[in-house]
Image: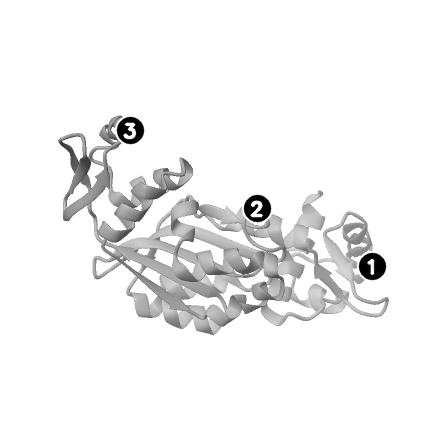
Amino acid sequence: MSSKKDILLEQVITQYLKSKEPIGSESLKASCSVEFSSATIRNHFKTLVQEGWLTQTHSSSGRIPTYAALKNHWVKYIDPKSPCMVENIQIIKQSSYAHDICCIVHIYTKNALQDIINIHNDFLALKLERGYAILAYNASLERFLHELKNLDVADIVKIAYQVRAKELLDALHNAQESEVKRFCVSAIYEMLASTSNEEVFLDIINGYCFDKLQNGIYFEDFLPKNYLGIVQEFHTAQGQSGQILVCGKIDRDYVSFYNQLAS
């Protein structure tokens, strides 16, 4: 894509995310920091439509970005590997409702696995930084757990989910000191329109998504098409930490959402 088309496409996306209205050539010309003629904009619009980056609902309307354009836009501008720094949880709640974006906040207390105690080949007692978890004895599981010593329970839960160690998952869930807060769940209610999305919806609102997903940005690999999910760590000025799932329609203004969090 040429630099001029790139600039115009980004301008269309930025305007559309704020207004949710089709963008015409004249309104785009007025807002662009780079000077373009109306004819140049219309020519680039035509090319961007042909390439699948913009679409037009009818011949007399402006253009709107396609799913592919919005997906590329968010991959470019969102960095889920960097922790989200906020003043407090209330800021997340406020920004969530202000932008119609669902936020699931998983607050946890550090709880490392300190030792694995074999009790007469009948049970395995997992000595945690905060308490114990008890499992039926299994030689393979014992060897596996020794490799996980000193890891935090939250990290072990993710590994247990990946290897389908259900008994270990259940024991650690009971031992894990965590709290899940849910804000603006209505932003993802439309997921329930298809019964195939019920499991995803329940994974999100129950916080099970944090067991299944690493920090990253997710589209149709986890969510229904036209949705976006971001999993990342967060830290508050009050010392709370954990993970947050930011989830909603792909055409929500996530830039403004994160700007409000940072403020």
Left or right of residue 227: residue 104:
left
Relative to the observer, which residue lies in front, 232 or 44?
Answer: 232
Of circles 1 and 3, which is in front? 3
Q: Tell me the number on the disc at residue 21.
A: none
Callout 1 amino acid = Ala
Q: Is the residue under label 1 in contact with that under label 2 (CB below 8 Å)?
A: no
Q: Is the residue under label 3 in contact with that under label 1 (CB below 8 Å)?
A: no
Callout 2 amino acid = Asp
Question: Mark 3 or mark 2: which comes first in sequence?
Answer: 3
Q: Tell me the number on the disc at residue 39.
A: 1
Q: Which residue is mark 2?
A: 221
Callout 3 amino acid = Phe
User: In the structure shown, which secondary structural element does the residue marked by tag 1 occupy?
Assistant: helix
Residue at 23%, 40% (x, y): give it: 135
Crowd class of label 1 (few under 14; some 14 to 19; many from 20; radius 10 Å): few
Tally of numbered tags: 3
Q: Work out how far the residue at label 2 is from the one at label 1, CA to CA, in angstroms.
A: 39 Å
Left or right of residue 169: residue 17:
right
Residue at 40%, 38% (x, y): give it: 164
Of circles 3 and 2, which is in front? 3
- Image quarter (top left, top right, bottom left or bottom right) of the C terminus: bottom left
Q: Which residue is mark 3?
A: 144
Relative to the observer, which residue lies in front, 172 or 159?
Answer: 172
Residue 162: percent from left, percent from top: 41, 38
User: In the structure shown, which secondary structural element does the residue marked by tag 2 occupy?
Assistant: loop
Residue 170: percent from left, percent from top: 31, 48
Residue 7 visible at all:
no
Q: Is the residue under label 2 in contact with that under label 3 (CB below 8 Å)?
A: no
Q: Quadrant of residue 37?
A: bottom right
Residue at 50%, 54% (x, y): give it: 229
